[in-house]
Amino acid sequence: MSVTTQELDEFHSYVQSRLVQSDPPESLQECLDQWRRERDEEDVVNEIRIATTEIEAGMGLPLDQATRRLRDELSWYGRTR
């Protein structure tokens, strides 16, 4: 993954905000790890929102149909059960 200028700017802003807190990070690595965790959490929340919107719009499958489709796909690869 290549780093973009926007990502670098976002990280820089994040580090600056963390440094002025009463409990600043002990290292730059700790700060980077926390920043990545928070970004991953945001991505998951956004994916859940998208999925919820799709389900509410009738674009989802009932569980039994989804399970059947997954089993069919896995058996195609020779992975039944």
Image (tube, grey):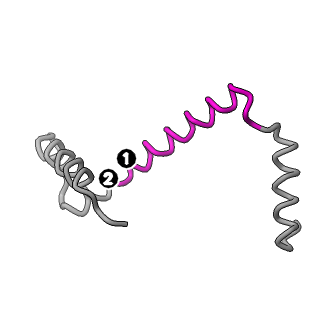
Residue type at mark 2 is Gln
Instruction: Describe the element under mark 1 as helix, strand or loop.
Output: helix
Cα gap from disc 2 to disc 1, whole angstroms: 6 Å
Q: Is residue 38 left or right of residue 59?
A: left
Residue range corresponding to the magenta coloring: 35-60
Instruction: Name the magenta segment's main secondary structure.
Output: helix
Seen in the picture, residue 51 relative to 18 is either above or below; the reply is above
Marker disc for residue 79: none
> Looking at the figure, which quarter contains the C terminus?
bottom right
The residue tagged 1 is 38
Residue type at mark 1 is Glu
Q: Is residue 12 magenta?
A: no
Seen in the picture, residue 27 relative to 51 is either above or below; the reply is below
Q: Quadrant of residue 31?
A: bottom left
Q: Is residue 67 left or right of residue 9?
A: right
Instruction: Describe the element under mark 2 as helix, strand or loop.
Output: helix
The residue tagged 2 is 34
Q: Quadrant of residue 58?
A: top right
Seen in the picture, residue 1 relative to 24 is either above or below; the reply is below
